[in-house]
Image (cartoon, rainbow, N blue to C red):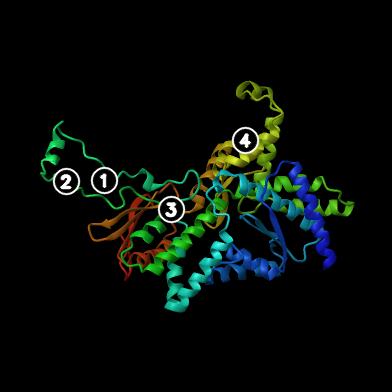
């Protein structure tokens, strides 16, 4: 075991130096070798330390079962933090660990330099440990069952937050408070009435809508405005919201992030002094990583192929590209570093997924017709736009808080920003009771079903549709 640690340590040092030579700029990375049970527990919870909940146990059981039956495997787990923590799977052979180590350094470079991670807390490992301790304290004080029921409700809507980052909408910065706004003087002599001691007429009352404009941050709005929540419940909602904001940039950069890591692990490993057997093993392993997906796109494959195409087109542009876009050539490597810094999955596919790549990767859109799945679209632009549409809001329904005082009864009115994909009605009907528990009063959700505007309501007794 000691010799294995020394060998891995030497590999880390060699790969670290090679990654630096390629220009990767990453946080300090600490590696730890873990048995499968530990690694899959980290994978299920998303972090080494997090509060306990039955959903995490369900995820762990599913992933561990797939590993036990050799259906899938987590080779590594890397945490976006400074320093960066990476966990290698005990039992990997040396070439597998070398590939994973190179992959991790590229991920860390992406975490550090991509603009969508600029608002990410780099000490979230410690923060989540504090959250976990606090929730255990609440379980002791209020009862495990009481806290679990509340966590169930919050986790049911945890994705409905305002994304962090440089482009996240800050409602409070765009609202002008009419009550504190200076009132325009009607005559040049209005100030004299103040000097005379006469009371200033109060501004006319305004019926202000709550919220003033629809807000996407459902978790934050309910946390701040629910009339029923106790202080500890608001604090739990704040914790889960903070954790979801940490995970959000990773969710909206899955393809470009994994593509960047796959692109670089291949180039770094090729620069190492491998034995013939290691070369064959690496080729086999790399091919399995880039194997096309059956029911969904493989982010490693699509992302790395796009980066390779960008590098080729900016390094050796065609005559048409030179004339049309003014590309001079020799800019391939600098261009992919630029793309790595400023794109997310949506803009990455929108801007750089070309006709040639769609055809090469055999990408298409399909849907279930009757009992069979059939291809419904192969036009490259429609395929690209279809893939992009599924990535909007990280694939979650876009739902806003429309009115928190609906019909002047303090009821919560939510609205689904319908863009062609209907909500799952069974999931919707199971989620509304959770929202009711958090708000404490009837909840309504407007959406489109079969082309018609439909409102679902829950009043604490039963769901109804109108």
- Residue of label 2: 204
Mark closer to the observer (3, 2): 2
Contact? badges 3 and 1 (CB < 8 Å): no
Give how far across and how far down residue 160 sits, in percent. Answer: 44, 56
Residue wearing tag 4: 355
How far, Cα to Cα, is label 2 from label 4?
60 Å
Give how far across and how far down residue 428 sits, in percent.
41, 61
* Disc 3 from disc 2: Cα separation: 43 Å
Q: Residue at x 49, y 70 (%)?
A: 134
Mark 1 in CB contact with mark 2 (< 8 angstroms)? no
The residue sitting at 48% across, 62% down in the picture is 240
Q: Earlier in the sequence, mark 3 or mark 4?
A: 4
> Which residue corresponds to the image point at 61% horizontal and 38% vertical from the top-left?
339
User: Where residue 95 is drawn, which disc sits there?
Assistant: none
Give x and y (percent) for residue 254.
60, 50
Q: Earlier in the sequence, mark 1 or mark 2?
A: 1
Mark 2 or mark 4: whose residue is earlier in sequence: 2
Q: Nearer the viewer, residue 190 or 351?
A: 190
Q: Secondary structure at mark 2?
A: loop
Judging by the rendered image, the residue that carries numbered circle 3 is 422
Vertical arrangement, residue 297 with respect to residue 49, above or below? above
Q: What element does badge 3 sit on?
A: loop
**Whether residue 79 is visible:** yes
> Which residue in the structure is indicated by mark 1?
180
Q: CA distance from mark 1 to mark 2?
A: 13 Å
Residue 420 or residue 430, whichever sits in front: 430
* CA gap, disc 1 and disc 4: 55 Å
């Amino acid at each position: 075991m000691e010799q294995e640690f020394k060998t891995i340590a030497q590999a880390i040092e060699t790969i670290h130096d090679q990654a630096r030579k390629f220009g990767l700029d990453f946080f300090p990375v600490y590696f730890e070798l873990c048995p499968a049970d530990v690694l899959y527990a980290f994978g299920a919870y998303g972090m080494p330390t997090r509060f306990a909940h039955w959903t995490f146990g369900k995820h762990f059981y599913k992933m561990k079962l797939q590993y036990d039956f050799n259906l899938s495997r987590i080779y590594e787990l890397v945490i976006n933090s400074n320093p960066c923590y990476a966990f290698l799977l005990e039992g990997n052979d040396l070439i597998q660990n070398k590939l994973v180590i190179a992959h991790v350094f590229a991920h860390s470079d992406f975490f550090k330099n991509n603009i969508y991670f600029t608002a990410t807390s780099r000490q979230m490992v410690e923060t989540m440990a504090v959250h976990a301790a606090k929730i255990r304290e609440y379980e002791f004080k209020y009862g495990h069952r009481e806290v679990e029921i509340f966590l169930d409700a919050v986790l049911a809507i945890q994705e409905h937050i305002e994304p962090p980052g440089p482009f996240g909408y800050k409602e409070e910065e765009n609202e002008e408070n009419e009550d504190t706004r200076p009132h325009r003087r009607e005559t040049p002599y209005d100030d004299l009435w103040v000097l005379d001691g006469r009371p200033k007429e109060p501004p006319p009352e305004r019926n202000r809508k709550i919220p003033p404009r629809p807000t996407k941050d459902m978790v934050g709005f309910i946390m701040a405005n629910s009339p029923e929540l106790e202080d500890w419940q608001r604090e739990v909602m704040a914790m889960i919201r903070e954790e979801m904001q940490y995970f959000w940039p990773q969710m909206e950069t899955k393809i470009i992030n994994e593509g960047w890591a796959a692109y670089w692990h291949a180039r770094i490993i090729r620069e190492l002094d491998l034995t013939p057997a290691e070369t064959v093993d690496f080729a086999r392993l790399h091919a399995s990583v880039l194997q096309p997906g059956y029911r969904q796109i493989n982010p490693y494959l699509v992302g790395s192929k796009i980066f390779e195409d960008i590098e080729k087109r900016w390094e050796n542009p065609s005559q048409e590209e030179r004339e049309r876009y003014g590309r001079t050539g020799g800019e391939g490597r600098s261009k992919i570093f630029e793309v790595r810094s400023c794109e997310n999955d949506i803009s990455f596919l929108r801007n750089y997924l070309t006709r040639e790549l769609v055809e090469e990767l055999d990408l298409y859109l399909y849907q279930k017709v009757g009992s069979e799945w059939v291809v419904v679209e192969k036009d490259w632009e429609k395929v690209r736009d279809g893939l992009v549409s599924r990535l909007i809001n990280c694939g979650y329904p876009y739902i806003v808080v429309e009115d928190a005082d609906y019909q002047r009864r303090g009821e919560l009115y939510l609205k689904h920003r319908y863009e062609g994909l209907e909500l799952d009605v069974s999931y919707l009907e199971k989620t509304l009771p959770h929202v009711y528990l958090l708000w404490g009063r009837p909840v309504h959700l407007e959406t489109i079903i079969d082309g018609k505007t439909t409102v679902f309501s829950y009043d604490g007794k039963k769901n109804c549709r109108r």
